[in-house]
Amino acid sequence: MGIRIAERVALCGYLAILAAIVVNLLLPNIARSESPSRTLPNIIFILADDIGYGDFGCYGATKVKTPHIDQLAREGVRFTDAHATASVCTPTRYSFITGQYAFRNPAGDHILSGEAPLSMDAAKPTVASILKKAGYATGQVGKWHLGLGNNDLDYNREIKPGPLEVGFDYAFFFPATGDRVPCVFVENHKVVGLDPNDPIRVSYLKKVGDEPTGLEHPELLVMKAAEGHNNTIVNGIGRIGFMAGGHKARWTDSDMADTLTRKAVAFIERSKEKPFFLYFATHDIHVPRVPHDRYKGSSGCGVRGDAIQEFDGALATVLDALERLKLAEKTLVIVTSDNGGVLEDGYADGSAASANGHRCNGPLRGFKGSLWEGGHREPFIARWPGHIRPGTTSNALIGIVDMLATFAAVAGVDLPPDAGPDSFNALPAILGSSPKTARESLVLQNYNGNGLALRKGPWKFIPARGPGTNGSMPLLFDLKTDIAEATNLAVQKPIIVAEMREELRKIRQGEKSRP
């Protein structure tokens, strides 16, 4: 009997060893299939609208208060030489989504209307499609302004192609800008709250319907409008373009920030079980600036300052959601803007007169729309607990066009050959693991693809007769000693001018700048 018991014990031991071997053989495969969704960090890219280099406290603002943005900078890295790639909205957003300079594509190199078709090839890789393929839930909330449809846009039917067709799982957006029609939100493929008995009509060429315009009835305006902003009146505000119908679907301007932030947080809550990528493009602080009542008069710098503080409040809500869901340690958060600051932009809202000494672009020359630094140099703050050393500052040269390659690196995936032709991996610069910049040079554009400038090292070159230069001479500035672009060194440095002119020519005529 004792022998039989011993045999049984031996047999059990043998079976246990065999089971362990089988489990060990299977576990690596299980780990390979499950670990990416467990270990990949979340990515939240928050793109403000018309925020200038000097609009945040951590970049020198003293009149406007941005405590949550400043805290984010204390907990992460603040860049001093980051750029929007373009000095207006659509080209910057195009470069972000595609990793391609917008000047290479006439469909996306200028400010689009609310009727424009989708400005990118939906079959090519985008930042969203790359991350989706890597296992991310992908969401877009806020301003789109990259075109919709294929020259057959009808806001009363399914609206596509759009964000979902370029890689986003979910989208809640407004089609163009706050000052352009249609003044409605779209969720995935449909206008939110649209009454089929009150169809939407939109035109940027002629008046549709019988609704009053700002030009015809300026007495109905609650905000005096400049030419071009005096078409169809919505909520007492003249807009660019003409709109009729869709009354139940129209947004309330003062609620836009809350609506978009609520949708952003809802996406985070739904996606918390797997890695997610959220592209949160706010309306603030673009015109028309109509902050919620709780922010009115809060800044002491007029309505523009109030809108900045509303943006800071939206960021606070997103960060609070990450803390509540215990996701802060697992999330890379980036905050920047699509172009430089501007004071009054189509509406006489008193922003210039009430600035109270606040300089929206700090020490920089120029404003939104120009090739001067004030048109495109931006605040850029990144936080990733445990990966980015808190309270650091970087002078690395980076552009929003670099986010596609950077986020691919975060996800640990190699870029396909046809992806991000002008996008460089800036992750080492963001993490502070490399003292060098992510790129040696960067092309910048103004309000369309015709006006370009080149940055290389401390030098900035603008070709002769470039839009916004107000002169026939080429411009060359040493930004290390002259960040205000006050002294043109083109005559004194002809060799550098020639070298930069040739490099800009090669980049412009080539198909890509990334190796």
Image: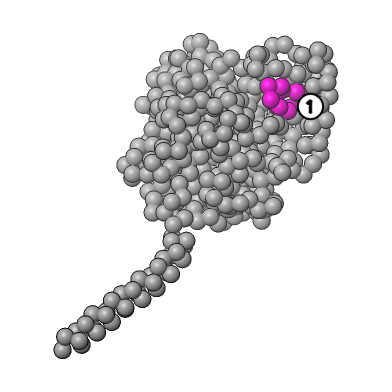
The answer to whether residue 251 is left or right of residue 112 is left
Label 1 amino acid?
A: Met
- Residue at 43%, 61% in the rendered image: 31
Read off the magenta span: 453-468
Where residue 437 appears, as percent x and y from the top left, is: 62, 31
- Element type at marker 1? helix
**Residue denoted by label 1:** 500
- Residue at 37%, 48% in the rendered image: 269
One can see residue 205 in this view: no
Q: As displayed, is residue 161 above or below residue 221?
A: below
Q: Tell which of 137 and 109 is nearer to you.
A: 137
Screen quadrant of the N terminus: bottom left
The answer to whether residue 506 is left or right of residue 329 is right
In the rendered image, the residue lying farthest to the left is 1
In the rendered image, the residue lying farthest to the front is 3
- Residue at 70%, 31% in the rendered image: 441
